[in-house]
Image (tube, grey):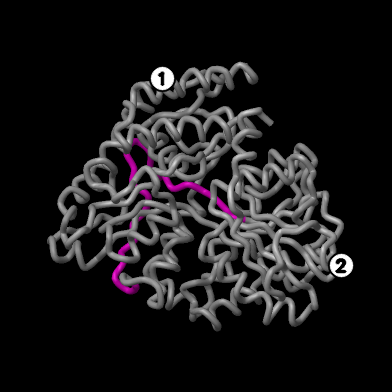
Amino acid sequence: MPSTRQTLIAGIAAVAVLATGCAGAGGGGSSSGGDKSINVLMVGNPQMEDIAKLTKDTFTKDTGIKVNFTILPENELRDKVTQDIATKAGQYDVATIGAYEVPIWEKNGWLHELGSYTAKDASFDQADLLKPMVKSLSGSDGKLYALPFYGESSMLMYNKDVMKAKGITVPERPTWQQVADIAAKVDGAEPGMKGICLRGLPGWGELGAPLTSVVNTFGGTWFTKDWKAQVNSPAFKKATNFYVDLVKKHGEAGAPQAGFTECLNAMSQKKVAMWYDATSAAGSLEDAKSSKVAGHVGYAYAPTVETKSSGWLWAWAWAMPKTTKKADAASKFMLWASSKKYEKLVGEKLGWARVPAGKRASTYEIPQYQKAASSFGDITLKSIEGADPSNPGVQPRPTVGIQFVAIPEFQDLGTKVSQEISAAIAGKTSVDKALNDGQKLAEEVAKNYQ
């Protein structure tokens, strides 16, 4: 792992800990609490906050296994989980990782194979998992190395009331130019409302994710098939300039610090009229308990330019580090957390719109879920099934991946380049300088593969 990663990891500050089963428990060593206690590290998204609230009175009550959750913002989560698993620290028994990490970490021998556990649990029904999810979470041997908690692609979300008041019809399959034109028209439609929210927070999985999907459809790529860096190529520059200009002109307040969580809040609290991001956000937007726009959101496919589609593909999934000494208890938790039974629990306890969807075909056949997700369920499922990690742009790629490049170095490369582009959004540097600097970094990475 690059020394820069070590420096970044060393700088991680306060850890937000939420424990179930007993107040004050946290991400302690994996031996704490005996075999009836496991430590789970996960990203601080709404679906994870839901499971932290539900576990004690359901899973723990039924199994006697106490679950200590450590919940972190996405960038901090990535640093923490990489540090723990790569160094074999063994602090956590389960961690949420995604489609980027699984094949790389499996190859490094860091993860438990999980197919043998799903095979022993008939109720889990692995065949019900959506094929894109299974493929993205499998290793080079074809075996499953992570269980999807929820899956997602990306889409455009918009305030229907604002559009109606302005006489605007949002196309089901918009182009990015159409989105930019609409953003200009709805900017200021209500007091304090901006036209669109796009992530500006540095991080290969924060700003880097939507930006790379925009780069793809503008005809750009990080690398050619033969590993020639393309970060300052005309298409990459055109896409990045478009993105930065759109955010600067019509984007959310505090854009350089806005990631998924901040944009979710901005959209749900009527601070922005549109938002391009993960399909998994829809469940939170449709939750009337926390969202002011529930029932008033329209959904469209990810905007395009030169490609037929541009939605990304991701799964936040449960993985078990090989360092755990509690594989049996950890596997029981993961099987439950990704089960049909858990989805039903969320639907009945918290509302069907909040079900962690995007991973099972059967979810989209549940009448209650169909009703709750009537405005976004079909677009979500079709976007996931239509995503093509092997061919996301207009040219052949050296690796799979839509919003990332599936090599270990991209974690550092993507983050550094995103930091420069975020600075461009903040007006502290130019896009040209950001991408020229990024090109040099990408060229160094490319040497490892040429």
Amino acid type at image mark 2: Gly
Whether residue 284 is situated above or below residue 324 in the rendered picture: below
Where in the figure is residue 259, as x and y percent of width and height? 43, 50
Front-lying residue, 176 or 31: 31
Where in the figure is residue 33, as x and y percent of width and height? 83, 68
Where in the figure is residue 269, as x and y percent of width and height? 32, 66
Residue lying at 54% horizontally and 66% vertically, measured from the top left: 47
Structural distance between the alpha carbons of marks 1 and 2: 53 Å
Front-lying residue, 99 or 419: 419
Judged left or right of residue 121, residue 191 is: left
Quadrant in which the N terminus is drawn: top right
Q: Which mark is residue 436?
A: 1
- Which secondary structure type mostly characterizes the magenta part of the structure? loop
Judged left or right of residue 342, residue 35 is: right
Amino acid type at image mark 1: Asn
Q: Which mark is residue 67?
A: none
> Regarding mark 2 in the picture, which secondary structure is present there?
helix
Q: Which mark is residue 34?
A: 2
- Which of the 4 image quadrants contains residue 10? top right
Where in the figure is residue 447, as x and y percent of width and height? 61, 16
Is residue 298 magenta-colored?
Answer: yes
Judged left or right of residue 253, residue 126 is: right
Between disc 1 and disc 2, whose residue precedes?
A: 2
Judged left or right of residue 3, residue 106 is: right
Quadrant in which the C terminus is drawn: top right
Stretch of the chain drawn in magenta: 294-316
> Regarding mark 1 in the picture, which secondary structure is present there?
helix
The answer to whether marks 1 and 2 mark residues whose Cβ atoms lie closer than 8 Å is no
Residue lying at 58% horizontally and 22% vertically, measured from the top left: 445
